[in-house]
Amino acid sequence: MITIVTSHGDIVVELFEETAPISCENFKHYIEDGHFTETIFHRVISNFMIQGGGMTADMQSKSTREPIKNEADNGKKNLRGTLAMARTGVVDSATSQFFINLRDNDFLDHSAGDFGYTVFAKVSEGMDVVDAIGAVVTSSSGGQQDVPMDPVTIQEIRISE
């Protein structure tokens, strides 16, 4: 199990290691390296998703490992409470950023029209914390939109077996 310790409370996550092995291994490497400590949920869109794992409170991007292969064709769906790898328009561009779906977002799933976003985990405890983060007031900051006006900090992420 993974515990995401945030300024709003803890979110416990179960990895889908069998269906998204590359993404899960990548996520665990970033945890072990301490990469997520003091990053923020920098993009929060009500009734859609919360995204974090790559920026500091002053909106600076953290350096990352090389991008990984997209595993969105693994059969997992972007359902409420699932975690997926964030990426650019390039299919195999995910690094450290991830998002948690606040609702079912089937348009983000693998399909003939779009390769989709890799679902690699689900929230098993703390969906109330996710929902509270999803309800924060946002604005524009550092050239980004949908940034919480009061930073929502990821204090640390821990692995516990």
Image (cartoon, rainbow, N blue to C red):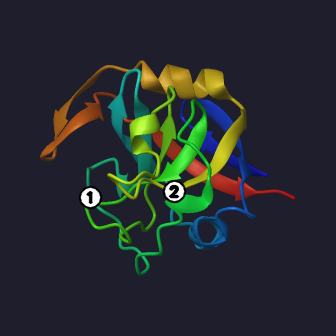
Amino acid type assigned to the residue bearing label 1 in the image: Gln
Lateral position of residue 157 relative to residue 78, left or right: right
The structure residue drawn at horizontal position 51% and vertical position 50%, both measured from the top left corner, is 84
**Residue closest to the eye, 107 or 35:** 107
Question: Horizontal placement of 34 versus 105: left or right?
Answer: right
Q: What element carries label 1?
A: loop
Give the residue pinned by disc 2: 118
Front in this rendered view, residue 73 or 42: 73
Q: Check the image and name the residue furthest to the bottom.
A: 66
Crowd rating for badge 2 (residues with CA inside 10 Å; few <14, some 14–19, many 20+): many
On the image, the x and y values in percent for residue 144 come to 18, 43
Q: Which of marks 1 and 2 is in front?
A: 2
Secondary structure beneath dot 2 equals loop
Type of residue at label 2?
Answer: Thr
Return the mark for residue 60: 1
Quadrant of residue 108 in the image? top left
Percent position (x, y) of residue 129? 60, 26
At which x and y percent is residue 56? Answer: 35, 53
Whether residue 152 appears in this view of the structure is no
Asked whether residue 78 appears in the rendered view, the answer is yes
- Residue at screen point 54% across, 60% down: 73
Give the quadrant of the C terminus.
bottom right
Asked whether disc 1 touches disc 2, contact meaning CB atoms under 8 Å apart, the reply is: no
Measuring 58% from the left and 71% from the top, which residue is drawn there? 26
Label 1 to label 2: alpha-carbon separation? 25 Å
